[in-house]
Amino acid sequence: MRRATSLLMLFTFLLLPGAVWAQQPDIPYDLRRMAEERLQQGGGDERQVLSPLDEVQPPSDADRGRPDDAGRDKRVSALEADYSERARADLVQFGYEFFNQVPALDPGLLVGMASDSYRLGPGDEIVVSLRGQVNETLRTRVDREGRVLLPRLQPIAAAGRSFGEFRRELTSQIGEVFLDTESFVSIGAVREFQVLVAGEVRQPGLHRVTGLSTLLDALAAAGGVRKTGSLRRIRLQRGAASHDIDLYDYLLGGNGAADFALQAGDRILIPTLGPTVAVAGEVLRPGIYELDRPAISAERLLDLAGGGLRPRGYRYSRLAVDDNSRTVVEPLDSGAATVASGDILHVEKRSEGREQYFELTGHVTVPGARALRSAPSLQALMRSGKVLGDKPYMLFGAVRRWDAGTGAPRYVPFSPRRVLAGIEDHRLQESDQVVFLSMSSVRFLSGPSVQRVLAGEGAGPCTGLTALADLVAHGEGARFDAARQRVFSDRDDFDCPKVFRDHPGLLPYMLEHAVNVQGEVQEPGAYPVAPDTAVSDVIAASEGLTLHADAENIEVMRLGEPGLPSRTAVRRQISLRADGGLTVTAGDHVRVPPRFGWQERGMVALGGEVRRPGTYAIRRGERLSELLERAGGLTDEAYPLGAVFTRRSVREQEAESYQVLARDLEMAMATTLSQEAMRGSEQGGEVVAGIRQAISTLRSAEPHGRVVVEADPAVLQARPELDMLVEPGDNLQVPKRPNHVMVMGQVLQPGAQQFRSGRGVDEYVRLAGGTRDGADESRIFVVLPSGEARPLRISFWNYDEVRIPPGSTIVVPQDPRPFNLMGFTRDVTDILSKAALTAASIAVIGR
């Protein structure tokens, strides 16, 4: 009886849809409850009959005895088994797994929030909160006639209207009736109603939904679409109108109509599955797809499958079935071919014919492999678009190529500038590596890291430098003579460029093909060149000439000119403007001399008691007296006897002499240690400590480059032989006349004593407290204000009178014993004393 009643209800809804849904609120309670109980119980004793298309294969071992947690059907359909057998790959029907993850709607829960676009209907609860003169909350429902009735207000039509429109009208009426009262209108409980879901769903029949439910909610309530049902031809019947809905629009990321809002009286019909095709092989989403028409283009079908795993490089074929149920494989053009129902589009990587490639590396915009057919030559490559980086080196590039006979790599040089101009070209081959260089990588050749390796001082952490160091260590350093720089810094330069880490053999190759550019250019150094490179191009690569360059007498020297004996040097004097077409080759030396001029390159500084101190440009052959005259002469307070004149070249010589003397002391220290050990002296440690202190002082001493000069203009005029030539970098400081004499060294009270005319050395020493026990009175000397040092003796037997002018310094040295090493200590004492006195004189003048 129960089964008959249920079937009667189902047939009634299917045969008389309009009448049934028009009278839905009047359905007898017993029938409605029985339908709801059947939905909750899964159909009672009724057995569900499967279509032949929905027959299943035996479950796999992994799925055997393991029902799906959500109660969904994950079994393999007969359609999937047939396609999988023909394609020899596991294929599943697209879209049905969506319903295995969407839970069924519980009508008792309010899903979502009612927006202003929500369409009101009978049963929706309206909540009105009044605040002001009237404070109360009213609750009412939209009645069966679609109206809302509230006290003291006219009935308001609500059914079928948007909630926003209804709220504006209700708020307006409340404002007219209730003065000084604000109203807040919202939706309380959302109406519930039933829709019919029929056809190929797992649980067809009546399902309870809410006013916020969509088509997907109804399908989820019905257990989802079976694999025998269509996802592309779902029909929604609403009164006399019907809507066809394609779930593929929703499943593939579009909006579609899957979120179609349901209304009371809607009927949803899921027809059987339409025509299908399959995609197998190298695609992102292989599977079985339902068609919305009998056939589809292969290009559109690839879009449904998400496209290939790679953008190109595939071969396509169609697997069809003939009248004898045999699988027929046909090659296919993916752009123009069509695939009909039941066919399989198979996508595989091309296996016949390997694409030929070359590699682009170095200072390029996009490094990596490129098809040889796209750029068969260097000209085609460089004209195909922006290939080079921002600061390329245009005189040298290299193609790394493997010799077909030996398999060993070799480099083929080229000039990017000549290639781009159409003068030079090279055909590219399979597996070539085309290397372009940046200006910074070429500057690295003249940097300290490379130059130290060429000097045999070892390599840093760079594979290119390691390869170069191996060649130098095996006696092949002469190959890189043109790349050697005379002077290089002791500090490290920037990191090893990546191109030399990727191609270690490229660094020695570039050095071997370098041209040495020196002289009046902005960036002297080693520049690798391809054959037939113009001198003007090499000079342009070195950032051009300086302002003092002599462009008319550029010297180009070449070793081993063809037709001449080996290692014969050939020199040419060229004019850059007249002989701009002269070319250079690897190993050449280019020197740009300075232009001869009467003005020296540099400045001379005058300071102290001169009338117009400052820096002065000088002409060639200018003397000190002329410079002082240009500065206005000396002031009345000037003390020319104490003038401090320093010169850059002398300062460099002093620094070098300090280092030489320190090395001599180190060598003498070893001799001293052996002699003291032979004599068994206990003072050997003290001797070594003293020598080490002297060595440390020498190495850290700052040279000043002081030169004893005559700075009195009157004396220079009377004695022209004392008037010295000035050089760029000279510095003359003229102090004020001092009124003291310094006493330093081994005296009881070192310091300044007031100058008095006629006072001798012995008196100044006595005023300083006399000498100490360790003083060497036989070596007392006086440093005059000019920097000149004069020895004197104040012993009873030998006394030399020395005139002591103001500003002089009397030095009482220490007895150098017990480690008087062949006069070394005496020399060190004199040198360090003079250096200290010069520094003190400069400091006094500065104050």
Image (cartoon, rainbow, N blue to C red):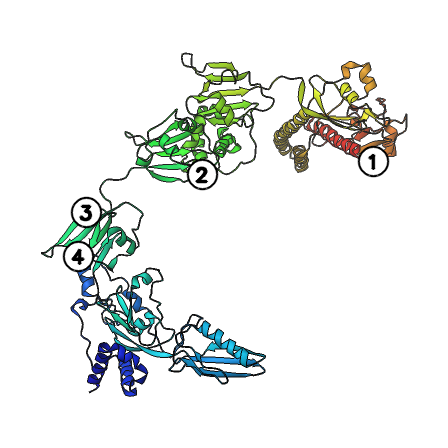
Residue 512 percent across, percent down from the top left: 43, 26
Residue named by callout 1: 751
Q: Residue at x 45, y 32 (%)?
A: 469
Q: Please state if 258 lies on the left or on the right of 2 as rendered.
A: right
Residue named by callout 4: 86
Q: Nearer the viewer, residue 703 or 390?
A: 390
Query: As drawn, which residue projects farthest toward the top?
Result: 564
Q: Nearer the viewer, mark 4 or mark 3?
A: 3
Q: Of callouts 4 and 2, which one flags the residue occurring earlier in the amino acid sequence?
A: 4
The disc placed on residue 498 is 2
Q: Vertical placement of 310 versus 442: above or below?
A: below
Q: Residue at x 37, y 33 (%)?
A: 381
The reply to whether residue 551 is in sight is yes
Q: Residues within 10 Å of mark 2 (few under 14, many from 20)?
A: some
Task: For mark 2, give the secondary structure.
Answer: helix
Q: What is the C-alpha distance between the residues marked 4 and 3?
A: 16 Å
Q: Nearer the viewer, residue 108 or 561?
A: 108
Q: Nearer the viewer, mark 1 or mark 4?
A: 4
Q: Nearer the viewer, mark 4 or mark 2?
A: 4
Q: What is the C-alpha distance between the residues marked 1 and 4?
A: 110 Å
Question: Decide: marks 1, 3 in contact (CB < 8 A)?
Answer: no
The amino acid pointed to by label 3 is Pro
Q: Nearer the viewer, mark 3 or mark 2?
A: 3
Q: What is the C-alpha distance between the residues marked 4 and 2?
A: 52 Å
Q: Of callouts 1 and 4, which one flags the residue occurring earlier in the amino acid sequence?
A: 4
The amino acid pointed to by label 1 is Gly
Residue named by callout 3: 331
Task: For mark 3, give the secondary structure.
Answer: strand
Q: Vertical placement of 251 versus 202: above or below?
A: above
Q: Of callouts 4 and 3, which one flags the residue occurring earlier in the amino acid sequence?
A: 4
Query: As drawn, which residue projects farthest toward the left?
Result: 324
Q: Residue at x 77, y 16 (%)?
A: 722
